[in-house]
């Protein structure tokens, strides 16, 4: 969810944009732009990040979102409205709810994939932890590694991960497919290395 918008066909210069090499690498793979203040504020919430994931492939009503996140409906509606007002959620055609009431389902637009939002470490980790621990233990996969890499190898590794992310992110609705979450973080292990 970090982005900058380089000119078409141009790679951003990390030193001129303030980007990390990873963000610059991702910007090369997918054209991105800086989030507005309102967009960045909207995405600076682990619960709103989770709502976007919930509504990624299936339109959900506020009631369904509240149930899935454990929020009361009024709190959920506050988050849903912020996401809709900034274009991250799009209202769909109204439908009848469980008790016959009119519900408006919302679908994620995918807009967050193309934004640079600054440091959202805490929000991303909180959203990931909530989603990961809610998944059945038997179906979770987790790994951790340390690797000795030169600067060129770090850039190669980041580029290949970015390309893999983009390849699989672009695969949406398919028969027999279910949504899986993926979280990857990369950081220098030795605090004295930099």
Image (cartoon, rainbow, N blue to C red):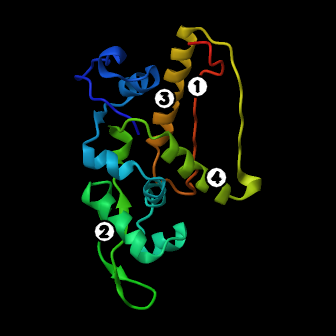
Mark sitting on residue 132: 4
Estimate the spatial distance between the alpha carbons at disc 1 and disc 2, rounded to whole Å: 40 Å
Q: Mark 2 points at which residue?
A: 92
Instruction: Say which element carries label 2.
Output: loop
Residue 167 shown left or right of residue 84 in the figure: right
For the residue pair 171 and 142, the one nearer the viewer reads as: 142
Mark sitting on residue 187: 1
Estimate the spatial distance between the alpha carbons at disc 2 and disc 3, rounded to whole Å: 31 Å
Q: Mark 3 points at which residue?
A: 162
Estimate the spatial distance between the alpha carbons at disc 4 and disc 1, rounded to whole Å: 20 Å
Lower position in the chain sequence, tag 2 or tag 3 = 2
Whole-percent x, y for residue 180 in the image: 58, 50
Q: Closer to us: mark 1 or mark 2?
A: 1
Give the residue at the far front of this rendering: 192
Estimate the spatial distance between the alpha carbons at disc 2 and disc 4, rounded to whole Å: 28 Å
Structural crowding at the residue carrying mark 1, measured as other residues with C-alpha within 10 Å and reported as few (<14), some (14–19) or many (≥20): few
- Residue 56 is at least partly visible in this image: yes
Lower position in the chain sequence, tag 1 or tag 2 = 2
Contact between labelled residues 3 and 2, with CB atoms less than 8 Å apart: no
């Amino acid at each position: 969810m970090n982005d900058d918008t380089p000119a078409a066909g141009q790679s951003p210069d990390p030193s001129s944009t303030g980007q990390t090499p990873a963000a610059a690498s991702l910007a090369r793979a997918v054209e991105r732009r800086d989030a507005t203040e309102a967009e960045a504020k909207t995405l600076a919430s682990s619960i709103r990040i989770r709502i976007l994931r919930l509504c990624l492939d299936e339109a959900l009503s506020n009631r369904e979102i509240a149930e899935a996140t454990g929020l009361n409906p009024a709190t959920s509606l506050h988050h849903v409205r912020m996401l809709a007002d900034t274009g991250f959620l799009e209202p769909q055609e109204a439908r009848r709810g469980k008790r016959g009431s009119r519900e408006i389902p919302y679908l994620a637009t995918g807009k967050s994939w193309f934004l640079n939002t600054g440091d959202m470490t805490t929000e991303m980790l909180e959203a990931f932890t909530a989603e990961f621990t809610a998944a059945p233990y038997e179906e979770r996969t987790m790994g951790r590694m340390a690797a000795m890499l030169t600067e060129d190898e770090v850039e190669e590794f980041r580029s290949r991960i970015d390309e893999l992310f983009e390849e699989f992110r672009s695969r949406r609705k398919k028969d027999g497919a279910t949504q899986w979450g993926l979280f990857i973080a990369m950081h220098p292990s030795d605090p004295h290395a930099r």
